Image (cartoon, rainbow, N blue to C red):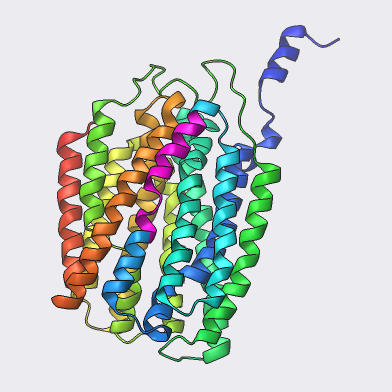
């Protein structure tokens, strides 16, 4: 007969076989959802600036406005959805709703004949992102032990970015097949990208509905619930978290939409096909670095890894500013991918470190809002700097702001 103590331990311990890659099933399947969603989004949205410029014939100020509004849209929803997920204790339903709204919006780009309609689609897509992002990040944190927070977020960002690699690779194949090495994007090619890109988005919604669940944590010692890595309860939003948000705003003021990277690449003579290949390379670097960076932050601390990432960002944006040959774009995009890999997952893990589990949804709402709302002035400013001064001007600004943010993080925020 089995020892009752041993039996109880077996009941209370998670089965190793149910942890793919040593992660909870929630983290694994949310990674798959992000993978498929990014396959879709990168196929449809990465070269949307070229659709606006080459097909709809709009200028960079309008592109900057559209991308700025897109990135800043529904910022209050990020706070509201995060707060609501804290109050209800239900994060999955909000995440699924957000993914669903974005999926429903994408097919309308097939019919787009004016920049106003494009703006409407981007607005709806970002509403979906605003609803899902905070609950999803809180769901990842809730499903993870404090000692592996960096690993879980690194894994999530790695799968998300591998989706971009696949999506951009598929987009490059479609572009090459339909228009070879043409410098400008055609309407029919973009419409095909929209049609193909819708499919993985629909599959992603089905996966989150059927395979992701809200964790049921009963005790204060459960993974990621109420304790910090040193088992000390935290205040709701401390001074360190607030200062970190302010520094993120400083950084984001120089971090304009990636639409300007697309335009910069075309400005230096890259065709649509080669621009897509460059983005494949960028996302591959991003994906390869994300998980090791997250695991490194679990050992060395988040702040050191973030500072390193911002230093790489400053160098990459300086490279975008001074690049004069098309081959330079490959080098600076590689650095840009290294920045993303080093910081995207780690900053999310840092937020989880700084707040209690009962407030994570709201905290991620404030974090994503601080970044999102600043993206509008950043992108509008970049559009005008490009138009009225020089295409290099937005990148000089971004490099300088990253330097200021890194120094601020070193001096004002402790680990």
Eyeballing the image, is 177 above or below 252? below
Q: Which region of the structure is painted magenta?
A: 70-86
Q: Residue furthest right?
A: 1
Main secondary structure along the magenta-highlighted residues: helix
**Is residue 314 shown in magenta?**
no
Q: Is residue 72 magenta?
A: yes
Q: Is residue 185 visible?
A: yes
Measuring from the top left, give residue 338's x and y in whole percent: 35, 58
Q: How many marks?
A: 0
**Which residue is more in the foreground, 8 or 387?**
387
Q: Is residue 74 left or right of residue 322?
A: right
Query: Residue 160 in the image: x percent, y percent?
Result: 51, 55
Q: Quadrant of residue 115?
A: bottom left
Name the one closer to the observer, 389 or 3. Answer: 389
Q: Which quadrant, please, contains the N terminus?
A: top right
Quarter assignment of residue 391:
bottom left
The one nearer the camera, 70 or 46, is 70
State the residue in front, 325 or 200.
200
The image shows residue 412 at horizontal and vertical percentages of 17, 35
Residue at x-position 35% and y-position 45% = 369
Q: Image height check: is 64 above or below 232?
A: below
């Amino acid at each position: 007969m089995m020892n009752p103590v041993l039996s109880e331990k077996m009941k209370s311990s998670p089965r190793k076989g149910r942890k793919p890659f040593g992660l909870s099933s929630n983290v694994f399947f949310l990674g798959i959802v992000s993978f498929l969603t990014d396959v879709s989004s990168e196929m449809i949205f990465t070269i949307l600036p070229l659709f606006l410029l080459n097909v709809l014939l709009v200028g960079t100020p309008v592109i900057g406005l559209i991308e700025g509004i897109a990135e800043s849209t529904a910022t209050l929803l990020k706070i509201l959805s995060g707060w609501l997920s804290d109050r209800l204790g239900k994060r999955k339903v909000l995440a699924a709703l957000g993914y669903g709204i974005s999926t429903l919006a994408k097919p309308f780009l097939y019919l787009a004949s004016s920049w106003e309609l494009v703006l409407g689609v981007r607005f709806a897509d970002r509403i979906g992102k605003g609803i899902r992002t905070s609950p999803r990040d809180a769901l990842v944190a809730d499903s993870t032990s404090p000692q592996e927070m960096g690993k879980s977020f690194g894994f999530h960002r790695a799968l998300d970015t591998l989706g971009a690699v696949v999506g951009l690779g598929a987009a490059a194949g479609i572009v090459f097949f339909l228009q070879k090495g043409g410098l400008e994007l055609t309407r029919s090619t973009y419409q095909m990208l929209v049609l193909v890109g819708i499919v993985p988005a629909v599959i992603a919604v089905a996966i989150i509905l059927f395979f992701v669940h809200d964790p049921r944590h009963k005790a204060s010692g459960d993974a990621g619930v109420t304790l910090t890595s040193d088992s000390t309860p935290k205040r709701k939003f401390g001074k360190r978290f607030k200062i970190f948000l302010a520094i993120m705003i400083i950084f984001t003021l120089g971090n304009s939409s990636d639409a300007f990277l697309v335009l910069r690449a075309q400005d230096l003579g890259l065709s649509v096909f080669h621009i897509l290949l460059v983005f494949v390379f960028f996302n591959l670097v991003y994906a390869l670095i994300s998980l090791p960076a997250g695991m490194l932050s679990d050992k060395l601390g988040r702040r050191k890894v973030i500072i390193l990432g911002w230093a790489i960002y400053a160098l990459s944006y300086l490279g975008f500013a001074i690049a004069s040959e098309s081959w330079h774009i490959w080098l600076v995009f590689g650095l840009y991918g290294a920045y993303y890999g080093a910081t995207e997952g780690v900053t999310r893990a840092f937020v989880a470190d700084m707040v209690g589990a009962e407030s994570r949804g709201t905290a991620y709402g404030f974090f994503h809002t601080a970044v999102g709302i600043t993206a509008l002035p950043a992108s509008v400013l970049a559009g005008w700097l490009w138009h009225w001064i020089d295409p290099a001007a937005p990148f000089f600004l971004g490099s300088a702001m990253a330097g200021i943010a890194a120094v601020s993080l070193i001096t004002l925020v402790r680990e």
